[in-house]
Image (tube, grey):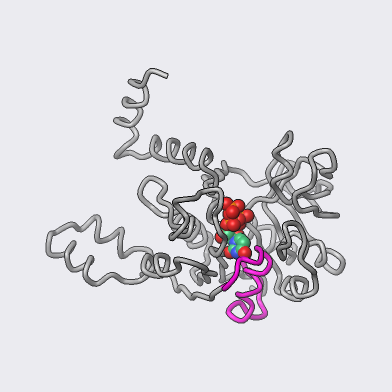
Amino acid sequence: MQNKVRKAVFPAAGLGTRFLPATKAMPKEMLPLVDKPLIQYGVEEAMHSGMNNIIIVTGRGKSAIEDHFDVSFELEHLLETRGKKDLLAQVRGISDMIDVSYVRQKEALGLGHAVLRAKELVGPESFAVVLSDDVIDAEIPCLRQLLDIHEFYGASVVALMEVDGPEISSYGVVDADPVAHNGLGGRLYRVHNLVEKPKASEAPSNLAIIGRYILTPDIFNSIESIPPGSGGEIQLTDALKHLLRQKPIYGLKFEGKRYDAGDKLGFLKATVEFALKRHDLGGPFRDYLKSQTI
Ligand code: UTP
């Protein structure tokens, strides 16, 4: 029971420069993938992994996120009087099942800094961090996969993905050795070092950290102990490196497909693939795509 994780932190205060001008007045976490904002995919993943205590770190345009997870009496009343039961259930569903709190990051000083803003709300327990512009399509939710490792080892766990070529320098990268663990087929690693955005020639491996973490509460002390790093920002990767001096950290090559929806091309790929999988849209959308001469 002591390793049960109840809280998930969603940093959503980044500047989203890769998606300008759409992100000028609206956080990228509110960009809709087919018909749901990116952050809702992450919140549903947390919910399906057993966490319903959601902490959102907001910056500019925070009201759009707050309104999205709030009850909308006017809209619900309208849908009710028009007999739109399915839509009503969709609009109500999520806000009924989760408890959302908000904390503000006034300046985008880095992911580590954003996570630190949640310290008081998290308290002395392990918690998840979800970067909702990383959308993950998986049979078993990625967070659930990480939680299983956390519950076994009681340690922090990061999600890993193989990235080959120059792209690796856009990520935090681990130096890690495989750990034998039943049923994981060599996908679990013990982390020995982490580097934020290394040059491709200096990357310690092709194992990149993507936007899902389970962290023990001592990460807050590590964040407070480190100076600004890459890009002048307080980096979560640097805090993990600091934490590694005292505590083990594991990495799991998760099962599933990750889309970088904070990037225009990644967002388009996710939109097409998610739309094709929808039972209500997939057929006509596929026909439309086939009719396009490229
Ligand atoms: P990114 O690295 O994607 O940065 O942040 P960004 O500023 O949002 O976007 P680009 O690169 O300029 O296009 C990863 C996650 O960390 C959050 C972002 O909202 C995103 O979910 N973040 C980042 C913060 O909450 N605060 C920060 O200071 C930095």
**Left or right of 180, for residue 109:** left
Image coords of residue 53 (percent x, y): 51, 72
Residue displayed at 32% across by 26% down: 288
Image coords of residue 39 (percent x, y): 47, 58
Q: Is residue 118 magenta?
A: yes
Pick the quarter of the image with the C terminus. top left
Image coords of residue 41 (percent x, y): 46, 54
Q: Residue 217 or 272: which is nearer the viewer?
A: 272
Q: How many labels does the image show?
A: 0
Pick the quarter of the image with the N terminus. bottom right
**Left or right of 92, for residue 19:** right
The part of the image, by quadrant, that contains residue 84 is bottom left
The part of the image, by quadrant, that contains residue 88 is bottom left
Q: Does the magenta stretch include residue 70?
A: no
The part of the image, by quadrant, that contains residue 40 is bottom left
User: Image height check: is 118 above or below 267?
Assistant: below
Residue displayed at 49% across by 36% down: 269
Highlighted magenta segment, given as a residue range: 105-129
Image coords of residue 239 (percent x, y): 76, 65
**Left or right of 120, for residue 135:** left
- Decide if residue 220 is in sight here: yes
Residue displayed at 30% across by 61% down: 91
Residue displayed at 42% across by 47% down: 33
Which quarter holds ligand 1? bottom right
User: Image height check: is 159 above or below 61?
Assistant: above
- Decide if residue 142 is in sight here: no
User: Image height check: is 52 above or below 292?
Assistant: below
Q: Residue 25 or 162: which is nearer the viewer?
A: 25
